[in-house]
Image (cartoon, rainbow, N blue to C red):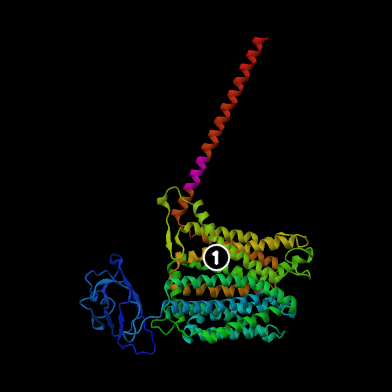
């Protein structure tokens, strides 16, 4: 591998660099490039790339390097006495005395980068979880319409969603992260005062910060990681860290919110959110460096992305269906987040005081319940691969040749039908579970516990189907256009959720649960239309085979029973005859 890096960013691009052969391998049969020891390669311009070169047995690399650089850019000085061996050229410096950072220094740099990003992720996710646990109770205590305030965030989120990504790329990811932290601090401070104008501003700005949260931090990580030249294989480590600490922070935020609310009242979690965001702000301001995304040529405008997305939806109905399905399920989750608090509060009125899920005052322990929801989702996500594997085995067709599979990065070989059937089954189960607050008696002592259990199971199933949705996006939506293609459904979802939430001012919560359950049923129906006719034929073939096997088994059992009864009758007649002779 020829890995060329510039160590000093301030050097002009046309300055000549030299790379020295520093790493040798004794087994040249496995080499991709053969060079002579102490070979000096001079590059007249900086090109940041990593290329795998063809094998060269004669010690010459002129033809290989010319595939990457123009001939006038390369000079090779090969000592006649040097021996040929495979090399790894890891450093290009302004002179032949400079070397790449030592392994220990590189490890320390990567560890510092990893810890830095994990700290910011924990602080941000704690703050995000804290401000969501007692929002309904806080607004209701102020005496304002919870639905009217809650829907404002979705409206501004829908309006700003198309421009957020391109804007972040232009102003810089660090500046955008600082802006996010400052806005979040302001939002959570405004939430602590019962001033209507302040709450309106808070909710509207909250829609903007939600979009920033989903685009700023991961894009900064992706660009900064490559900018610093860390090993690509270790990128997965940081992504795994991010997922793990995000889940743990979401769970912990619920329990922290519960204790803060008991000590400081409903504003306590928002005070905790301010503290966590200040920590994130300090780390970003002190440690992060700036990077951009739109300085590169060929970056489209927001209108261009949306235009391409509409064109893709028109040309491929499957992409449109995936967008609709995942828009509906995402909207259902958002409406459920709004509905679960008042639903449990209503059912808690007749529940025993010592029942699990209630606080000392007999009210639902919102923070603890939120933490339990997050834990259920995490468990579902962890078990999702095993569940999907079991569904794949269950739906295996009659012959191996009939099993179409798709290779997806990070997932391996995936059978589309298994993922699609699992997602549809999860949607139907969610639809049934969301009907629980309607089916249970409002005056029953066990109604609160039953509803809480169904909500926990719902969150578990959400944790199962969300990875399936990621796989389905990989199956049907091109990776280079995935973000823009999902932006348009997100806009529609935000508007739909806002309308759905505001309608709760005029309809009961039970009717709202009916509507959300219906959305999940519709999602399941559309999801099944993605299954190919070949897969359906394979499934029906297996069902027919199972029916034939079952019929043969029943016939065989019937025959055996008939023979047994005949044998019994014969034995009885024979015994009677013997008895008569004896008499």
As displayed, is residue 152 above or below residue 55? below
| Res 581 quadrant in image | top right
As displayed, is residue 12 above or below residue 273? below
The image shows residue 572 at horizontal and vertical percentages of 63, 20
The image shows residue 400 at horizontal and vertical percentages of 42, 50
As displayed, is residue 11 above or below residue 408? below
Q: Is residue 12 left or right of residue 130?
A: left
Q: Is residue 253 left or right of residue 548?
A: right
Specify the quadrant that holds the N terminus: bottom left
Q: In this orientation, which residue lies closer to the viewer: 341 or 366?
A: 366
The image shows residue 290 at horizontal and vertical percentages of 48, 86
Which residues fall within the magenta stretch?
A: 541-549
Residue at coordinates 62% horizontally, 17% vertically from top-left?
573
Q: According to the image, label 1 marks what residue?
A: 466
Q: Secondary structure at mark 1?
A: helix
| Res 268 quadrant in image | bottom right
Q: Is residue 505 visible?
A: no
Q: In this orientation, which residue lies closer to the viewer: 389 or 471?
A: 389
User: Does 276 appear in magenta?
Assistant: no
The image shows residue 218 at horizontal and vertical percentages of 50, 77
Q: Main secondary structure of the magenta part?
A: helix
Residue at coordinates 53% horizontally, 37% vertically from top-left?
553
| Count of marks overlaid on the render | 1
| Res 100 quadrant in image | bottom left
Q: Is residue 397 visible?
A: yes
Residue at coordinates 67% horizontally, 74% vertically from top-left?
256
> Tag 1: Cα neighbours inside 10 Å, few (<14), some, or many (≥20)?
many
Specify the quadrant that holds the C terminus: top right
As displayed, is residue 430 above or below residue 300? above
């Amino acid at each position: 591998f020829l890995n060329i890096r510039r160590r000093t960013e301030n050097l002009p691009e046309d300055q000549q660099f030299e790379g020295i052969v520093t790493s040798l391998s004794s087994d040249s049969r496995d080499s991709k490039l053969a060079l002579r020891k102490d070979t000096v390669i001079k590059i007249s311009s900086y090109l940041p790339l990593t290329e795998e070169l063809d094998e060269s047995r004669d010690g010459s690399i002129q033809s290989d390097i010319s595939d990457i650089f123009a001939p006038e850019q390369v000079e090779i000085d090969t000592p006649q006495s040097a021996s040929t061996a495979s090399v790894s050229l890891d450093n290009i410096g302004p002179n032949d005395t400079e070397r790449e950072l030592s392994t220990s220094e590189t490890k320390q740099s990567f560890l510092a980068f990893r810890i830095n990003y994990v700290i910011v992720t924990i602080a941000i996710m704690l703050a995000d979880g804290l401000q969501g646990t007692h929002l309904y109770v806080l607004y209701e205590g102020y005496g304002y319409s919870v639905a009217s305030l809650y829907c404002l965030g979705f409206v501004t989120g829908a309006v700003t969603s198309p421009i957020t990504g391109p804007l972040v790329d232009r102003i810089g990811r660090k500046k955008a992260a600082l802006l996010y932290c400052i806005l979040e601090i302001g939002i959570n401070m405004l939430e602590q005062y019962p001033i209507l104008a302040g709450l309106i501003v808070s909710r509207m700005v909250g829609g903007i910060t939600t979009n920033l949260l989903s685009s700023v931090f991961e894009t900064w990580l992706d660009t900064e990681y490559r900018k610093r030249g860390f090993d690509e294989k270790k990128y997965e480590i940081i992504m795994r860290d991010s997922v793990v600490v995000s889940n743990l922070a979401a769970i912990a935020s619920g329990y922290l919110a519960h204790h803060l609310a008991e000590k400081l009242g409903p504003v306590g979690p928002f005070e905790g959110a301010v503290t966590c965001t200040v920590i994130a702000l300090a780390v970003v301001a002190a440690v992060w460096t700036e990077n951009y995304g739109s300085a590169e040529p060929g970056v489209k405008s927001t209108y261009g992305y949306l235009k391409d997305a509409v064109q893709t939806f028109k040309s491929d109905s499957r992409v449109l269906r995936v967008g609709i399905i995942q828009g509906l399920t995402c909207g259902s989750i958002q409406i459920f987040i709004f509905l679960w608090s008042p639903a449990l509060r209503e059912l808690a009125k007749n529940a025993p005081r010592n029942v699990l899920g209630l606080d000392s005052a007999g009210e639902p322990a919102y923070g603890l319940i939120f933490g339990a929801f997050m834990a259920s989702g995490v468990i579902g996500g962890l078990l999702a691969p095993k569940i999907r594997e079991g569904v794949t085995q269950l739906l295996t067709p009659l012959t191996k040749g009939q099993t179409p599979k798709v290779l997806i990065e990070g997932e391996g070989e995936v059978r589309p039908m298994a993922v699609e059937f699992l997602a549809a089954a999860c949607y139907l189960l969610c639809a049934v579970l969301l009907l629980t607050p309607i089916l249970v008696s409002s005056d029953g002592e066990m109604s609160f516990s039953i509803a809480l259990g169904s909500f926990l199971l719902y969150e578990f199933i959400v944790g199962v189907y969300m990875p399936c949705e990621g796989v389905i996006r990989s199956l049907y939506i091109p990776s280079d256009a995935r973000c823009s293609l999902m932006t348009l459904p997100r806009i529609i979802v935000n508007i739909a959720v806002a309308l759905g939430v505001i309608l709760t001012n005029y309809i009961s919560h039970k009717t709202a649960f009916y509507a959300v359950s219906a959305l999940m049923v519709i999602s399941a129906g559309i999801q099944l239309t993605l299954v190919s006719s070949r897969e359906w034929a394979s499934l029906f073939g297996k069902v027919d085979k199972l029916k034939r096997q079952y019929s043969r088994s029943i016939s065989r059992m019937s025959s055996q029973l008939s023979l047994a009864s005949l044998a019994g009758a014969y034995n009885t007649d024979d015994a009677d005859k013997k008895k008569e002779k004896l008499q």
